[in-house]
Amino acid sequence: MISNLVKAGLTRRTFLQSSAVTAISAGLPGAAFAADKTIKIGFLAPLTGAVAAWGKPGLDGCQIWAERVNAAGGIKLGDDSYTVELVSYDNEYDPAKARTGATKLIREDGVSFIMMLGGDTWPGVQPVADRTGMLFSTLLPSDLSPDTATLFAPTEVHPIYLVTGVEWLAENRPELKTAVMCAQDDALGLPSVATYLAAFEAAGIEMLDEPLLFDPATTDFAPVVTRLLSKNPDIVCLDTCYSDYVHPIAEQLFQQGFTGQIISATADFYDQMIAKTSKEFMEGFIFQFPDFDDPALNGDNINFEDPNGFYATYNERHPGQWGAVSWEYASIMDLWKAAAEKAGSAAPDAVAAAMKEGGTGNHAFGDAKWWGTELFGIDNALVGDWPVVVIQDGKAVIKGFRSIPDWYDKHGDLLVKHMQAYDQMWDQRS
Amino acid sequence: MPKYIVWMVLLVALLLLPHGLSFSQQEILVFLTINVLVVASYRLLTLTGEWSLGHVVIMGVGAYASALFSKKLGIYVPVTMLLGGITAALVAVILSFPLFRMKGFYFLIGSFAASEIIRLLWKRFRDPFGGAKGIKGIDPMPDFSIGIYDFDFFEPVSYYYFSGFIVAICLWILWRIEKSPVGLTFHAVHWQDKLAEASGVNLRAYRTLAFAIASGFAGIAGALLAHYIGTINPNSFDVEVMVFVLTWAIVGGTATFYGPILGCIVLTVLNEIVLRELGFEQMRPLIYGAVMILSILFLPNGLESLVQKFSQRRADGLAPNKASKGAAE
């Protein structure tokens, strides 16, 4: 049949067979030259555009991680060591380009694992993942569903960790009783809104208004902030706004004279925010992503290797660019490396099995468990402790680590209630 | 050389093209094929002198309609693609009532406002549009075999052949429309509107017709896209994407049928293949913008003017030969 000659189709079976052959042949002593002993890892995230702040710093962090691992002898699979090579593709946060990128990384570059930001881009990639069985990671567990068996959320359990910030706030500033919230109306903003609503309700903090959802194309935040402040709240919550929104909103809050509490998922490049407002204004700003020079990260509970050294190298190479994701993809690579070494193979199936073995894993902020059936329909999210970070005297400081599972055990019903109200449960997504 | 030989060579080249490309380039080829229809349909609208900022959203109307017809009503996918185009054309007719009370710059802004309303409706009504996350798990085009070739529509080559066939038919129809009396009237509406009106041409009706036809074909392009990537969301059809369509049209030129198509092909290859391969992945927006500015400065009539210059020179070169041949005879 001509069709058989012409068509060189890809199935999960043929892909996994070729992966297994590659992995086995790579593992045979003396079968490969040292120069051939390379494992390629794919990085498929936005490197340009509005969401680049959650892709590019992560790639920079991964480069540092790869250099450190390679300098320490690489990844050991069986008796052999392999150097790590990162291959990136800018998906511009577009599902069609993400599909193209996934195809390139898998079928042309021969990567063993692909890291993604997720969100809008994952549905474009999912058919490729289904067909190839490739192992993917996402920073957004809201991508998870029972249909995404090869997708893992091993670092950031966005947005569930947000409850820890609100819990800490309620305990340490009990006089603050009212809040308002704004968020961009997209796949990232809505599950965060539901989570913050649950956290505020659990903490006994009253929402003065419905969350204000603005269009992601918004550039003028003066009306948004004016409406938020018209309710005279104690707390303004910035949800999981992109840094392109957090900065102008903070500026507007400053210009319109707000002196209350601000809480946000991120405060990327907060030094620039301080420069645009004032140190006094930013004092007490709560968010969830620490600088890795924080002494609290030197504790025995931390699984990220040499966080202070990593932060120093990062800042040396990319001054002023440290952000929420700078360490996250590197942390995913830590988990992947440990699992691959345990499995003795880089084959996606073997690494996935090793990663979930025993139901627990070494999360950057401590030992954690694979979790998520109730919220995501699958236990592919690694959940444990998460830090609460506060800006003090112009510097981000970890105020403590809080357990996400402990909060969920007490208030999980509230989270499910609000997630359902925003159609964010896995079985509600269209 | 006889024209049909040129077309045959082109057809064979297009059939062989994906087999000379890498997998990711095959993927880009699929999106390029779909975008060719978007930009060619956009040109039909510009024939009447109106430039819209809502064409991509109208494309999205076709994508959403086709996705919903297949997902919610279980209609066979190729039929839903056609229905997507029809829905987009109908939406355009409805929009034409307020929009064609305006002209020129006001129409441009009005079309942007109307398209934003449509995008906000997609976001606001999670049922059936899926809200900000959009619709995912859209039924793919069902695989089939024609004996000598098995179409597996996960594979970009199969989808390229399928979408290429659809786009070729659409381009032929667009071409025939432009060359028909209706198409000539579109030109008259643009360049001689007072004269046309005095001759009994209903300007508004022809503008509406051009808008509806262009939207119908954009809707088919949207449907082709939706059933390939399996997911759509309001951001897939935002003004940023519209800027790309405008750029293709401006850089390519809109005086000829092939101008915008040329712009689309050259800029897509530059942006998605050349700059990525050269390692300028993160500098692409900067370089792309520079190309746009330079082309406006040095090629104000678009890339099509280069083709016209080349063919004019060729014709001039052939003319003396012909003349001398004639003299000898």
Image (cartoon, rainbow, N blue to C red):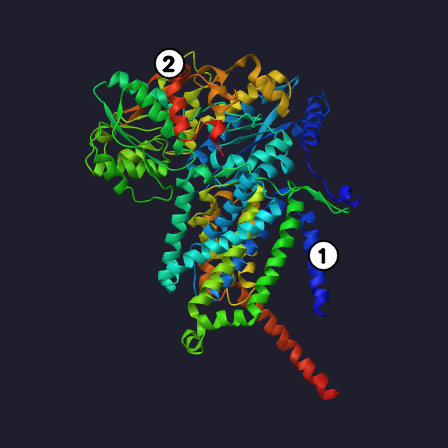
Quadrant the N terminus of chain A occupies: top right
**Residue in the picture at 45% in, 43% down:** B234
* Structural crowding at the residue carrying mark 2, measured as other residues with C-alpha within 10 Å and reported as few (<14), some (14–19) or many (≥20): few
Q: Nearer the viewer, residue B123 or A21?
A: B123
Q: Position of residue B98 (x, y in %)?
A: 37, 59
Q: Position of residue A274 (x, y in %)?
A: 27, 33
Instruction: Give the labeled residue for mark 1.
Output: B12
Instruction: Give the labeled residue for mark 2.
Output: A410
- Considering every residue shown, the one lying at the far right of the view is A1
**Residue in the picture at 41% in, 46% down:** B119
Instruction: Report whether B77 appears left or right of B107.
Output: right
Quadrant of residue A266 within the rendered picture: top left
Please, what secondary structure does the residue beneath circle 1 have?
helix
* Disc 2 from disc 1: Cα separation: 66 Å
Which three-letter amino acid code belongs to the residue tagged 2?
Lys
Q: Nearer the viewer, residue A206 or B66?
A: B66
**Residue in the picture at 51% in, 49% down:** B62
Q: Position of residue A268 (x, y in %)?
A: 36, 32
Task: Mark 2 vs mark 1: give the one in front.
Answer: 2
